[in-house]
Image (cartoon, coloured by chain):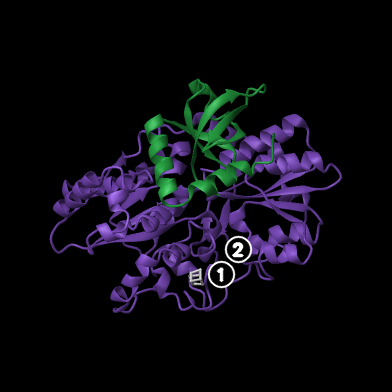
Chain colours: A green, B purple
C-alpha cells in the first residue's frame, strides 16, 4: 500500500465521516475523521493512507508530491489504489 | 545521479549535499539509521546515496511492517482461511509474503478465500455484504496504519457488524528503536526519524533517544530534499555536541501528533505484554492487540490459532538485514534464490523492504561490488 497519496477534497459526503477526494482525476470517498477537528474545507489537500485522510498539506506540497510520483512512474499506482477502495 | 536535474530545485539539492560535506569531521565515519521503510524506499528510488559522501553510511531500520512479522504470524493468518473457512482480507503487501506452506497468493491458488483490500474499510464492507461468512482483517502496520484499523473497529461496532474480526499485527516503533539502541552490535550515530508514524504519535516519544542515549533524531519527510536536510540537521547536532529531537517535517508532522488517532487507538487496542519481531526477537510492550472493550472483534479471541513459532529458512539472513548489521546484498540468497519474483523473505516482497529496494534500483547494483570487499562483521549478536 502507498504510504501517502495526495488528494484534493471535492465535496463532503452526507455522512460527516467521509469526503470525496480527487487523486489525479480518480474520485473516491475517503474517511476524514482524523482531520475533522481541524475544520477541513473543499479544495483542501490531504495525504491519504489506506482509505483515510491522515494529514492536511498545502497545494504546493501536493503538487510537488504528485510531480515526484509521476517522475517515478508511481502516480498511476497511487490512482489505482484509490480506485480500488471498495467501501462506499 | 539520475534524477537530480529533474528535482524541483536541483541547485538547492546540490547546495544541501555540499552543506553535508562541510559539516562532516574529516576522517570520521558516520552511521545513520533511517528507521522507516518509507525512507529506505525513497533513498533508493531517488538514488540519494549517490549524493552522499562514502563516509556517511545509511543503515536501514526495522520500519517495514511485513518485514518484521515472524513467519508464524503469517501462518496463523492463513489458518483463519484454511482451517476456519473465514474470508481473510489483507493489503497487497502481504500477498506474496512467504508462510511455511507458501504465501497468501499460493493459498488462494489452493482454494483459500483470501482477498486483497486497499483499506480496512473494504474488509468491513465485505463483512456487511457476506453476513453468513466470517470476515477477518489481517492488520499490519506501525502507528501510521493502526488508526485506520482503530476507526474501522469503531465503525464496525457502531454498525453492529457481528462477523468482522481483526487479526492484529500492529506494532509500535518506539520499543523497536530502543531495542536497536540496546543491541550490542549496533553503533548508530543518529536517526532519521519516521515521517508518517510521527504524524500520528508526534515527536515527544523520541525524547528518550536524545536524553538516555545521547543520539540526535530528526523526524524527516520523504522528498529528496527532506532526507538530505534531515542529515544536515543530524550533522549539525553532532558538530555542536547536541542530542535533541528535531522536526524537519513540521509542515506535515505536528509536535503533539494526531489526537483523534491516538484516542481511537487507545480505545480499541491494548499493548501486548510482548511480541516477537523477526530479527529483533521478543520485545516487551511493542505491539497492539485488540482491547478488551472490543473483544468481540478480536480474531485471536474468536478463533483457535496454531500459534506455532516458525524459524526462517536457515540460509536466509533477514534478521541481520533487519537489524542493520548486514547489507541486503550480502545475504547469501540475495538475487539468487531470493528475488522479488520468488521471495524467500518478506524484505524482498514489500516495497518498503531493504532487499526489494536494493534489488529494484539497478543503479545501486553497480556499487555493490565496490563495498563487497571487506568481510561483514555481522552476526555478533
Ligand atoms: S535476500 Fe531474501 S532471504 Fe536474504 S535477507 Fe533479503 S529477504 Fe531475507
- Which residue is label 1 attached to? B343
Circles 1 and 2 in contact, beta carbons < 8 Å: yes
CA separation in Å, label 1 and label 2: 8 Å
Q: Is residue B145 left or right of residue B15?
A: right
Sequence order check, earlier mark of 1 and 2: 2
Which of the 4 image quarters holds residue B320?
Answer: bottom left
Secondary element at image label 2: loop
Residue positioned 38% across, 59% down in the render = B44
Q: Is mark 1 within 8 Å of ligand 1?
A: yes
Count of marks overlaid on the render? 2
Q: Nearer the viewer, residue B2 or B106?
A: B2
Q: Residue furthest right?
A: B132
Residue B67, given in percent of the width and then of the height, sits at 53, 60
Q: Which disc, if any, is residue B209?
A: none
Residue A31: percent from left, percent from top: 60, 32
Outermost front residue: A25
Question: In the rendered image, which quarter is residue B211 located in?
Answer: top left
| Residue ID at (77%, 67%) | B110
The answer to whether B225 appears left or right of B174 in the picture is left
For disc 2, the chain is B
Q: Nearer the viewer, residue A79 or B75?
A: A79
According to the picture, the residue beneath numbered tag 2 turns out to be B97
> Can see residue B175?
yes
Residue B169 visible from this viewpoint: no
Amino acid at each position: 500500500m502507498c504510504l501517502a497519496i495526495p488528494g484534493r477534497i471535492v465535496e463532503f459526503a452526507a455522512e460527516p465521516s467521509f469526503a470525496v477526494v480527487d487523486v489525479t482525476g480518480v474520485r473516491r470517498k475517503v474517511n476524514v475523521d482524523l482531520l475533522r477537528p481541524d475544520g477541513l474545507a473543499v479544495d483542501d489537500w490531504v495525504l491519504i493512507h489506506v482509505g483515510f485522510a491522515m494529514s492536511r498539506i498545502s497545494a504546493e506540497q501536493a503538487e510537488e508530491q504528485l510531480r515526484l510520483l509521476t517522475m517515478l512512474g508511481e502516480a498511476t499506482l497511487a490512482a489505482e489504489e484509490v480506485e480500488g477502495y471498495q467501501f462506499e | 545521479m539520475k534524477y537530480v536535474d529533474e528535482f524541483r530545485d536541483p541547485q538547492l539539492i546540490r547546495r544541501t549535499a555540499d552543506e553535508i560535506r562541510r559539516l562532516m569531521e574529516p576522517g570520521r565515519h558516520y552511521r545513520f539509521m533511517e528507521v522507516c521503510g518509507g525512507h529506505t524506499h525513497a533513498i533508493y528510488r531517488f538514488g540519494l546515496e549517490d549524493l552522499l559522501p562514502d563516509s556517511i553510511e545509511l543503515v536501514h531500520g526495522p520500519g517495514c511492517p511485513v518485514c518484521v512479522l515472524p513467519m508464524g504470524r503469517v501462518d496463523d493468518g492463513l489458518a483463519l482461511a484454511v482451517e476456519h473457512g473465514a474470508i481473510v482480507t489483507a493489503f497487497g503487501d502481504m500477498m506474496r509474503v512467504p508462510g511455511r506452506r507458501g504465501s497468501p497468493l499460493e493459498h488462494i491458488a489452493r482454494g483459500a478465500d483470501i482477498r486483497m483490500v486497499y483499506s480496512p474499510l473494504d474488509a468491513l464492507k465485505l463483512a456487511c455484504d457476506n453476513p453468513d461468512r466470517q470476515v477477518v482483517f489481517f492488520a499490519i502496520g506501525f502507528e501510521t496504519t493502526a488508526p485506520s484499523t482503530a476507526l474501522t473497529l469503531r465503525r464496525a461496532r457502531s454498525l453492529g457488524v457481528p462477523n468482522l474480526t481483526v487479526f492484529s499485527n500492529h506494532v509500535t516503533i518506539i520499543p523497536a528503536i530502543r531495542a536497536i539502541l540496546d543491541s550490542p552490535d549496533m553503533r548508530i550515530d543518529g536517526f532519521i526519524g519516521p515521517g508518517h508514524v510521527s504524524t500520528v504519535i508526534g515527536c515527544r516519544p523520541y525524547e528518550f533517544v536524545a536524553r538516555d542515549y545521547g543520539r540526535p533524531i530528526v523526524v524527516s519527510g520523504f522528498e529528496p530534499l527532506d532526507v538530505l536536510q534531515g542529515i544536515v540537521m543530524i550533522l549539525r547536532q553532532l558538530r555542536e555536541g547536541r542530542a535533541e529531537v528535531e522536526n524537519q517535517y513540521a509542515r506535515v508532522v505536528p509536535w503533539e501528533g494526531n489526537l483523534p488517532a491516538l484516542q481511537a487507538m487507545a480505545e480499541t487496542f491494548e499493548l501486548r505484554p510482548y511480541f516477537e519481531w523477526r530479527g529483533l526477537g521478543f520485545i516487551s510492550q511493542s505491539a497492539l492487540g485488540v482491547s478488551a472493550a472490543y473483544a468481540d472483534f478480536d480474531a485471536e479471541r474468536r478463533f483457535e490459532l496454531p500459534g506455532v513459532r516458525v524459524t526462517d529458512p536457515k540460509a536466509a539472513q533477514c534478521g541481520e538485514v533487519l537489524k542493520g548489521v548486514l547489507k541486503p546484498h550480502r545475504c547469501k540468497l540475495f538475487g539468487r534464490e531470493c528475488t522479488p519474483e520468488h521471495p524467500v523473505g518478506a524484505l524482498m516482497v514489500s516495497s518498503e523492504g531493504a532487499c526489494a529496494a536494493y534489488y529494484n534500483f539497478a543503479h545501486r547494483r553497480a556499487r555493490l561490488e565496490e563495498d563487497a570487499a571487506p568481510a561483514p562483521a555481522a552476526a555478533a549478536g
